[in-house]
Image (cartoon, grey):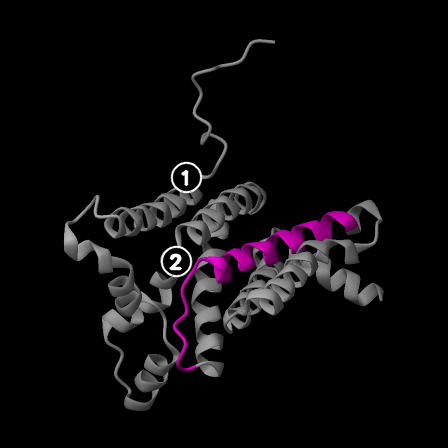
């Protein structure tokens, strides 16, 4: 069987997913090269810290905006910009790989615009919930919206298992494993309160999929009535 050896490996990945990953990877590449003195000169060593100070989400700022009724654009941007900042190259690489995989699966099943809606909404609402509970620890990293995509994937799998007549509880295996690994790493190496935003992202992604998947809400109502 012949194949096109010149075909791009990105052809099967929704362009919106590729764009998100390239933005994320480009930001991390600039931080990493700057920290090594390869890009931007001596001042670039502090690019990561400056980026986190300027674009990370902080609950204290959200509370200040609500209390004062002032919503500067540079602070509203934080609700959307924090997923593109990571504390290390390894964290960014892992996030990019997961986003490529989940973005492809969810994008192909739901459509790229619906996938983007899950990503953006999970990003914003995860930050809001995180900010309500944590005021003084900056939120960075793509894992809250990635967990949103995991929520969407879980709902898709839940529907598929139901159609096959199999136990739908199996759909929650992935999130169960991830939370278990997170608990182990937290106990071994310590961890921050980021899990709050990640769980919030999962719930938001799962809930949105009920509405966004064609016929998903009707099928859910049908199953609930059947019970």
Q: Is residue 170 above or below residue 207?
A: above
Point out residue 165 in the picture as x, y percentages from the top left corner: 84, 49
Which of the labelled discs sits on residue 149, or is there none? none
Q: Is residue 19 above or below residue 127?
A: above
At label 2, counting other C-alpha atoms closer than 10 Å, the crowd grade (few under 14, some 14-19, many 20 or more) is many
Mark 2 residue element: loop
Residue 59 location, x and y as percent? 39, 79
61 or 85: nearer the eye?
A: 85
Foreground pick, 206 / 132: 132
56 magenta-colored: no
Q: Quadrant of the N terminus?
A: top right
Q: Which residue is mark 2?
A: 86
First of labels 1, 2 by sequence position: 1
Q: Which residues are magenta?
A: 135-161
Instruction: State yes or no: discs 1 and 2 in contact (Cβ < 8 Å).
Output: no
Residue plotted at (84% across, 49% down): 166
Tell me the tag on residue 15. Answer: 1
């Amino acid at each position: 069987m012949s194949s096109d050896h010149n075909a791009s490996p990105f052809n099967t990945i929704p362009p919106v997913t590729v764009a998100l990953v390239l933005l994320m990877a480009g930001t991390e590449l600039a931080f990493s090269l700057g920290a090594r003195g390869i890009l931007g000169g001596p001042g670039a060593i502090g690019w990561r810290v400056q980026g986190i100070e300027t674009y990370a989400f902080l609950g204290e700022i959200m509370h200040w905006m609500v209390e004062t009724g002032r919503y500067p654009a540079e602070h509203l941007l934080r609700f959307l910009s924090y997923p593109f900042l990571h504390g290390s190259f390894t964290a960014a690489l892992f996030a990019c790989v997961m986003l490529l995989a989940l973005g492809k699966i969810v994008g192909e099943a739901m459509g790229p615009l619906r996938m983007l809606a899950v990503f953006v909404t999970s990003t914003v609402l995860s930050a809001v919930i995180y900010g309500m509970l944590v005021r003084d620890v900056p939120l960075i990293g793509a894992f809250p919206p990635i967990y949103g995509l995991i929520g969407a994937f879980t709902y898709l799998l839940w529907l598929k298992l139901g159609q096959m007549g199999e136990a739908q509880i199996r759909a929650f295996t992935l999130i169960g494993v991830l939370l278990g690994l997170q608990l182990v790493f937290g106990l071994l190496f310590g961890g921050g309160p980021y899990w709050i935003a990640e769980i919030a992202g999962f719930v938001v992604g799962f809930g949105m999929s009920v509405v966004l998947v064609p016929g998903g809400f009707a099928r859910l109502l049908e199953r609930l009535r059947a019970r």
